[in-house]
Every structure is written in structure tokens, then in C-alpha cells.
Amino acid sequence: MTDYLYQSFSHAVHLLISADAATYAAIGTTLKVSTLSMLFSLSIGVPLGFLLGHYKFYGKKIIKIILNVLLATPTVVIGLLVYAFISSKGLFGYLNLLFSVSAIVIGQTMLALPIVVALVSNAIEEVDQQLKLTLLTLGANSVQLAQTIIYEARYVVFIAIVIAYSRVFSELGISMMLGGNIKWYTRTIATTIALETNKGEFALGIALGIILLLISLITNLLIMFCREKFTVN
Amino acid sequence: MLKHCKVIKLIFIGIYSLLWLILTPSASLAKTTSQQLLIATTTSVDNTGLLEYLAPLFKQDSSIELKWVAVGTGKALALGKNCDVDAVLVHSLLAEQKFIASGYGVERTQIMYNDFVMVGPPSDPVNIRQLTITEAFKTIAQNQALFISRADDSGTDHKEKEIWKKVQIDPTKKSSWYLQSGQGMMNTLQIAAEKKAYTLTDRATFTKYQSLHPQNTPLMILVQDNPSNRVGQELKNQYAIIIVNPQYCPKISYDSAKKFKNWMITTRTQNAIDDYKILGKQLFFSNAELPTPTQVH
Amino acid sequence: MTSQKYMSTVASVYNITDLRFSYGKHFSLLLDQFTVKQGQIIGMVGLNGQGKSTLLQILAFLLKPPVGKIEYFGELVTRNNIDNLRQTVALLLQETTLLKRSVFENVAYGLIIRGFNKEHIEEMVAKTLARVGLSIANHGKKQSHELSGGEMKRVALAARIAISPQVLLLDEPTTSIDKLNKDIIYQTLVELNQEKQTTIIVSSHDESWLSKFTTAQIEL
């Protein structure tokens, strides 16, 4: 059993060093989809999270419950819902998005969005109520208020980035459903592992899994470095 | 302080954009342009690597790039119905006929075949070796021997259900001996091996499975069509291409699909299919009805 | 104490009439007439719950009373100009909240959002820190959570002085502050008032402290 793992490990190294084209294509696609969905979910989710956390309004509790439900949605379900819209017969079928990288990004953004919104809104609520008043006493207008409060809660924004990224990076259901696992184009590391495992190529599956973890490690280190640089705590 | 933020974000974006440009082939990824063809096929075809072998040949002859999604037969036909692919390559006659009758597909063309086999543990607990397939199924049901079904609407699953229908047994109620995996062929074989159960499989996947377990194969072929007569009907696994109906789905690349279909039945391609071997064993047998000379129309 | 004659020629910073503010069923603030002249340092005393904080927030234009007329430097305060007028009044809240940043960045915040240039900001922060008895060299880079209670209060005060407000309001600045810091605070206020004629209103329980530097008193 141990040399089975050793075999996988050396296979992983070999794949990386020999610049195996299919593997690198999968790596590229994985990075592409996860980074794009992260960027989109952050740029939409952080402001939304702020609005949800900062303001009191009628129906706030209901929205929070809906948010929690969305957090637990299986990826296949998200994939199916997006499929319904972008399939040829769907509302946005004319955009020809299905089985493309863009389709995966849409699905993964839907996946990451509730995470970002939930984390950010919680953090904003936690932020000292006095802070808002303090900023007003210093003359901040509402835009400056929002920016400063979000910046004060930046620690949590980083956590949101890390958590959302890991959810998205190795996900399978959406990539399969919306990307189609087409070699060279929409095949990610995760879908390649699923494919190879289904073909019985376990050692290759583990090798790719090791590569996946490696990339995840590097990315997390980068994020941590960024965090260290400019958060207090 | 906010300046830091922007700088680091830009670095990230920079790195990833660079990786993007370097690592992935260009070409748009949308479903079809005039030089691309998207088909839905089954996992059994994809897992053997046949399409990877044929696609470059097709591109050479026609300048069309073949792309495919590999899903179960049921899903492949569903994608065709939804106009998400241009053609399907599947292996379930009854489902195909229904698909065409409903107006979703046209020009069904048979391409190649191989066969299904019944595999099980070498100990063969209820002695189905040397029986015909219908007798084997009956024996298994009567003795309640462990049997793993794919139960995933795949071509293999359809074939299995056809045989049950022939012997007028419905095993799908909850039972202790008929286990439904809902998974692909390789996984189902693993389960059968673990549980020392019988299962129906296509020969190609089983060949692959055997190559992964060179010593002490936990499963062996127990029932198959008479090998001297490869055209035995009961376990024949016939593959066919169906073009998605352009009247129902006006936006599909009908021309490219037609070219592909015609190319698949040329003598040259049919020979190429026969030449495709894994571990020295031929996986598919060409049987297009009217092989035509090597011209792509 | 200045003479009546002099008082009448100095500008009225606040001229408030018929102020009514209520909060729930139990609390209400009633003020028939309240005038503050420029350059005054006014102490505010009274028991807890009588409305000192509320009045200060109203004077800081953070709360708008439903009833009452407020004139600020002769201009009637309405919904339209209240945001602009707020820029010239600084309130130091009872509970000190600093941003999770360095001392420098905290003091500079008000100037940054007003769009001053880098050099001006550096100059002002250095000057203002010096006013409250801190030095930019020693304290500028310290993070806000590294400071003592008294230091935090002084940094918060500096942040408000840095924007050169017309009016400086302080809500119970001496709560849980030791004597040394209390003295630094009132000396800073006196200097500020002398140099810039900043109008100052301070509320506190410590009446003997207030008497050291305030020129008038109001009791709620």
C-alpha cells in the first residue's frame, strides 16, 4: 500500500516536471475558473454583505435564513439551476455559454457568493456600533463610512476569501455539469481526477490530487502573506 | 493602506492572467462555430480513448475540431433534446428509436459494435458458466445471488433491463441481492469485485479492468456471446450516431455533424476503428451498413 | 468671565430655541433657550440619563430633534445643510473607538477623507500629536491596540483637533482616565481655545476638574 502512494507521488512530480500538456491545461483551467469566480463573488458579495450587515430593515431576518439555506446547496443543484438558464433552450441560451469556462465561472460564483455575503455581513454586524458614530464625528460621508467599515473588518474579508476559494477550487458538480469536462478546454484538475478514478486509474487520480493540494497550498500562502502585510491582529 | 490592497490585487490578477495566457490553448469555448463540432457520447466510448484517437484524423480530413462531453446515454440524449449538442454517439437502440420518434434526432447511422459480457467471481456461486444470458439472469434471480446493476440510465443499464424484461422478472424493488450502484462501469466492477457479485459489463471496460488487476483477477467472464460468431444478438452492444434534428434545433451545426457522420462510415475510418487496440485487444468492430469510399461530403 | 457688552458683539455659535427631543416613553430633553458664543469653554453637568450625551450629539449634528430651531453661526440648520455643517464640528464620544491602524493613521483619518495633501497631513498630525503630549516619532507608528487607555483618549482627541473644527464637543472625556491624562486633556483644550478661539463644550461628572478651565456652565 505504501508503495502505491509512493508511486502516485513520483507520478505527480513527473507530470509537473515533464510539463505534461494535458495536466498543465487542467491546472490552467482550474486557476482560471477559481480566480475569476473569486473576483466576481468578492466584488458583488462584499458590498452586499456590507449592506446586509450594516442596515436594519424589514425582512432582514428572512434574508438571513435564505442565505443560510443557500450556503448548504449542493453543487449539483447549483449546476442544474444554471444549466436551466444557459442551455440552448434556456433564457440565456442564445449566449452559447454552456460547456465553456464562462459557464463554470457563473456557477462557481453562485457557489461562493453566499459564503462571502454571510461572512462579511456577520463581520460588519460585529463591528463596534460606536465605530459608525465615531466616523461620523470625524466627518465621514456614507461612501467613506462604508469603505472604512469594510476596511476595519478586513480580517474577516480575508477569511471569506480563503474559505470561498477552497470551496470553489476543488469543486466538481458545477464544473462537470456546466463545463462538460471537455479535454483541453473545460477540464479542471478536480474533474480530471473524477474521470481518471472512474476509469480505474487510481494512482493517476492521487497524483493529480497531490498537484491540486500543492497549488492550493501555494495560493493559500500568497493569501496569508497578503493578510499579514496589512491587517493588525 | 488602501493603496496596498490595490497593488496586491493587481499582482494576483497579473500572475493569473499570465498563467492563463501561457497554459491554456486559445480558441473560444462556446458550443459551436463553423469549425467545431460538439457531440455527446457515453463514458464507455470516452474511457477507451477512441475519440481521442479519431479526432485528429477527422480534423486532418475535414478541418473540423471535434469536441465531446462524456455522460450516460440518458443524459446524452437529454442534451440532444435540449439542443446543447450537435449530435450524439450512444448505444441503446430502444432509447434511440424513441428519441427519433419524438422528433429530436435524425439520420441514425450505426457505426461499430462490441459486446457485453456477464462477469462474476471465479467461484461462480450459482453456476451460471456456460448458460445463455437469459438462463443466467433467471438463475441469479431465483437463487438471489448478488448482482450489481448500474441503474444509471446508461446503455449498459438499458441492455440489462432489456434482458430482465425478456425473462419477465422485475428486480428493481428493494432487495438484498439486487444492488443498484448508480455509477459508471469501472466503479460498478469494483463493487462487484468487493462483494463477489455478478454484473453485466461491456467487454472494453472489462479489458481495462483486467489490465489493472493482472494477478488474481477478482472477476472473470462467465457468460458471453458465442465468440466464433461475433454477431450473436443478445449481448450485442451497437453504437450509432444520431444527428440532432435541425428543424427542432435550428442553431446546431448540422453541416459539421453530417460531415462527421459521413466520415465515420468511410472505409478508411471504419478500418481505423478496427485498428484501435488496447493491450493488443480490439475494442470496437466496425459495422456501418454502407461503407462508402474515402470522401467527406 | 467677560462683560456683558463684549459678549453681545461676539458671534453666536449656537442659538437654540424650543428644543424637544424624546427617546421612547421615558426620556425627553427640553431646552427653551440655549446660546453659545464663540470662544467659550462651557462645562455641562448633570446626572446620568438627563440628556448630556443627547444634547452633545444634537450639537454635533448627528441627531436631528423633531422640534426646535437651531441656528449655527446665524444660519438655520435644515436637512439640506446639516451634512455640510457637520464637517466643522467634532465630537469626542464617551467610549473611545480607534481604528485598527497606527496612531498616525488614526489622527490623519479626518484629513484624508477631506482630501488634504500628504505634506499638509503629515504636518498637521505632527502638530496635533504634540498638542496632546505625544510625539510622532515615538508614537506615530504604534498600533491602536498597543496604547494605554489614556493614550487612546488623547489620540482620539488629536484626531478631532486635526481637522481644525470650529466647535469641539467632548462627552465625559475623563471617565476611567488617570489624573495625569486628565490634566493633559484640559491643558490641551485651553491651549486650543487660546490659539484658535475654538468653542468647546465638555460634559463631566468631575466638577472640580471642569472648574479648572471652563468659563460657563450648564446643568441638565
Image (cartoon, coloured by chain):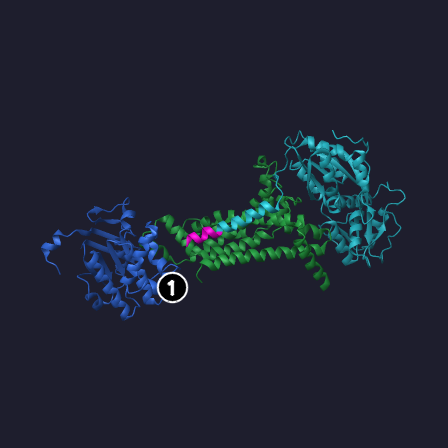
Q: Splitting the image into 4 quarters, where does residue C209 fall? A: bottom left
Q: Amino acid at mark 1?
A: Lys
For chain C, give the colour.
blue
Range of the magenta residues? B1-8
The residue at 89%/42% (across/down) is: B229
Crowd tier of the residue under label 1, counting other residues whose Cα lies within 10 Å: few below 14, some 14–19, many 20 or above: some
Q: Is residue B122 left or right of residue A207?
A: right
Task: Examine the residues drawn in magenta and state their main secondary structure.
Answer: helix
What is the x, y in percent for residue B258?
72, 31
Q: Is residue B231 left or right of residue A116?
A: right
What is the x, y in percent for residue B48?
75, 46
**Nearer-the-camera pick, C180 or B61:** B61
**Nearer-the-camera pick, B120 or A172:** A172
Q: Splitting the image into 4 quarters, where does residue C194 fall? A: bottom left
Q: Splitting the image into 4 quarters, where does residue C95 fall? A: bottom left
**Residue B58 higher or lower than A107, as above or below:** above
Secondary structure under tag 1 reads loop
Q: Is residue A21 left or right of residue B240?
A: left
What is the x, y in percent for residue B234?
84, 43
What is the x, y in percent for residue C17?
19, 51
**Residue B155 higher or lower than B292, as above or below:** below
The residue at 25%/60% (across/down) is: C50
Quarter in which the C terminus of chain A is drawn: bottom left
Subunit bearing disc 1 = C
Q: Which residue is mark 1?
A: C142
Quarter in which the N terminus of chain A is drawn: bottom right
Magenta stretch encompasses residue B7: yes
Q: Which chain is represented by green in the image?
A: A
Magenta stretch encompasses residue A43: no
Q: Which chain is represented by cyan in the image?
A: B
Residue B275 in view in this figure: yes
